[in-house]
Amino acid sequence: MKTSLIAAAAVMLLSFGANAANTMKPHHEDALDCRTCHTTKGKFQRPEAETCIECHGGMSEIPTDPNRWDKNPHSSHHYEDLLECTACHSEHKASRAICSECHIVEFPNLK
């Protein structure tokens, strides 16, 4: 019984790792491997903002398409440029516009 549970847990962990690798968004798929963003040793952790900034630049350098509310999430009067990139952007699951938690606004090009 214990052996079965251990084997099942190992399969789940291995399949999670495979799924994480297969869920990269298309704009990163060809350019990155796991260690490009996950620079910590050992357990994978959420990347620091500096890791994103190395490739994408700072908040003021990131182009953001205009929207009908004339809002720029990379220039927020709430957070300025202090918000971590991963507060909105995720590589292995859907990104989310945290602005929409309080405001009626859409960012159709959110990646």
Image (spheres, rainbow, N blue to C red):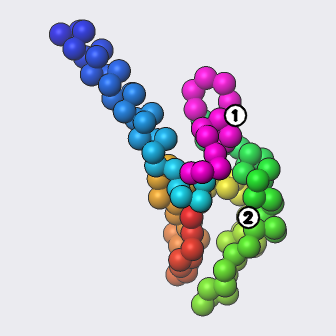
The structure residue drawn at horizontal position 56% and vertical position 51%, both measured from the top left corner, is 29
Residue contact between numbered discs 2 and 1, judged by CB atoms under 8 Å: no
- Amino acid type at circle 2 is Tyr
At horizontal 67% and vertical 55% (from top left) the residue drawn is 85
Q: Secondary structure at mark 2?
A: loop
Residue 64, label in figure: none
Amino acid carrying label 1: it is: Thr
Q: Nearer the viewer, residue 77 or 63?
A: 63
Q: In the rendered structure, does residue 58 fall within the stretch colored magenta?
A: no
Of 65 and 24, the residue lying toward us: 24
Say what secondary structure mark 1 lies in: loop
Position in image of residue 55 (x %, y %): 76, 53
Q: Is residue 4 above or below residue 78?
A: above
Name the front one of labels 2 and 1. Answer: 1
For the record, the magenta segment spans 29-44
In the rendered view of the protein, which quadrant contains the N terminus?
Answer: top left
The residue positioned 67% from the left and 84% from the top of the image is 66
Q: How many marks?
A: 2
Q: Residue reaching furthest front?
A: 30
Callout 1 crowding tier (Cα within 10 Å): few <14, some 14–19, many ≥20? some
Residue 80 visible? The answer is: no
Q: Would you call the spot at circle 2 few (<14 residues within 10 Å), some (14-19), or many (20 or more)?
A: few
The overriding secondary structure of the stretch rendered in magenta is loop
Please state, as top left, top right, bottom left or bottom right, where the C terminus lies in the image: bottom right
Q: Is residue 95 visible?
A: yes
Q: Position of residue 23 (x, y in %)?
A: 46, 49
Above or below 105: residue 32: above
Q: Where in the figure is residue 73, as x and y percent of width and height?
A: 67, 72
Residue 79's mark?
A: 2
Give the mark nearer the N terminus: 2 vs 1: 1
Tag 1 residue: 39
